[in-house]
């Protein structure tokens, strides 16, 4: 069950994620490959950007850090 401290921390993580939601996305990789079909034969390439939403990154980092803290507290 969640106690008051858990609820407050999860609320803070949610608030931080909501705050950065307007920042858009963060590009984490750019992949260049050969273009398909005849264009690839002619030597053309295509580039794909892999982007993650900033709010998702903040939420995942916050929840991971909180999970580590809970495990640390439980093992002590």
Image: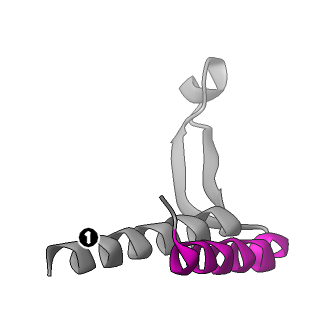
At label 1, counting other C-alpha atoms closer than 10 Å, the crowd grade (few under 14, some 14-19, many 20 or more) is few
Marker count (numbered)? 1
Question: Looking at this rendering, what residue extends furthest in the right direction?
Answer: 22
Quadrant location of residue 65? bottom left
> In the rendered view of the protein, which quadrant contains the C terminus?
bottom left
Q: Nearer the viewer, residue 65 or 76?
A: 76
Callout 1 secondary element: helix
Q: Which percent across, then down, holds residue 5?
A: 53, 81
Instruction: Place residue 43 in its image quadrant.
Output: top right
Residue 23 covered by magenta stretch: no
Picture layout, residue 6 above or below residue 49: below
Could you tell me residue 13's position as x and y percent?
A: 62, 75
Indicate whether residue 11 is drawn in magenta. yes
Q: Residue at x 52, y 74 (%)?
A: 6
- The residue tagged 1 is 71
Q: Residue at x 60, y 72 (%)?
A: 7
Q: Main secondary structure of the magenta part?
A: helix
Question: Which of 32 and 4 lies nearest the eye of the viewer?
Answer: 4
Where's residue 12, x and y in %? 66, 81
Residue 46 in the image: above or below residue 4: above
Task: Give the extent of the magenta segment.
Answer: 3-22
Is 13 in front, or is 44? 13
Q: Looking at the image, is 39 positioned above or below residue 56?
A: above
Residue at 69%, 71% in the rendered image: 14
Using the rendered view, name the quadrant where residue 35 is placed: top right
């Amino acid at each position: 069950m969640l106690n008051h401290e858990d609820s407050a921390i999860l609320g803070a993580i949610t608030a931080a994620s909501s705050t950065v939601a307007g920042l858009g996305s963060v590009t984490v990789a750019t992949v260049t490959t050969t273009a398909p079909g005849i264009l690839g034969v002619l030597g053309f390439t295509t580039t794909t950007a892999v982007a993650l939403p900033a709010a998702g990154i903040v939420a995942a980092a916050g929840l991971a850090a909180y999970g580590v803290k809970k495990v640390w507290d439980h093992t002590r």
